[in-house]
Image: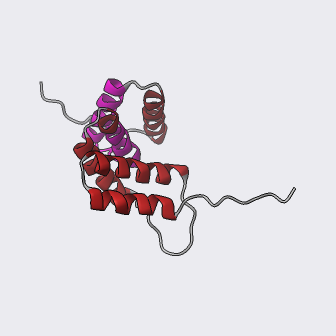
Amino acid sequence: MLLRPPSQKLTRMQSDFLSLTLFVLAQHSCLKELDALAAALSLVGKRNAQVVAAQMLVRFLNKNWGQALELLEELDRIAPIEQFGEYRQTDSQRMRKYLRARCLHELGDKIRTKNAIDSYLRHGKKLTLDPE
């Protein structure tokens, strides 16, 4: 059976609900369902950062390091982490850097692993001591 995208576009509310569903499925480790929903959203033209991140997470948790790394690279094109000037990374951005370092380590790419770890540490949260 050939699947094709629906003739009607998703409303903003429907799209937001499906994005939330991606998050809930990931949070509950429902990997098959997460992967199926992300694939379906890609099929209907909703391939955004959340969809790619969901697919990457499934590959990562299934220890498919090469595909997870490819999806991380796609995610970087869709929603770049690096910015110019001083900035603070979000937890999500730091997690992506960790995931990249782990994938590269598991693939045995020592040079790129070192660079990924350096990048991860370079923008870490600075601890401040409270004088009280």
Quick one: 63 or 113, which is closer to the camera? 113
The outermost residue toward the left is 1
Magenta span: predominant SS is helix
**Which residue is nearer to you in this view: 22 or 129?**
129
* Residue 81 showing in the rendered view: no
* Residue 51 drawn at (x, y percent): 36, 42
130 up-or-down from 3: above or below: below
Left or right of 55: which side holds 83?
A: right
Image quadrant occupied by the C terminus = bottom right
Look at the image and tell me whether residue 21 can be seen: yes
Spot occupied by residue 70 in the image (x, y as percentages of width and height): 25, 50
Residue 17 left/right relative to 128: left
Task: Say which residue appears at 46% left-offset and 42% top-offset.
Answer: 12
Image quadrant assignment for residue 128: bottom right
Task: Kindly give the residue lying farthest to the bottom in the view shown.
Answer: 85
The relative height of residue 29 versus residue 81 in the rendered view (above or below) is above
Residue 117, image x, y percentages: 41, 58
Point 39% across, 24% down: residue: 30
Q: Which residues are magenta?
A: 31-57
Q: Is residue 16 above or below residue 34?
A: below
Quadrant (top left/top right/bottom left/bottom right) for the N terminus: top left
- Could you tell me which residue is drawn at 43 percent across and 63 percent down? 119
In the rendered view, would you say 71 is above or below 83? above
Residue 61 among magenta residues? no
Q: Inspect the magenta stretch and tell me whether residue 32 lies in it.
A: yes
Q: Position of residue 121 (x, y in %)?
A: 49, 60
Using the image as rendered, state which of residue 11 and residue 122 is in the foreground: 122
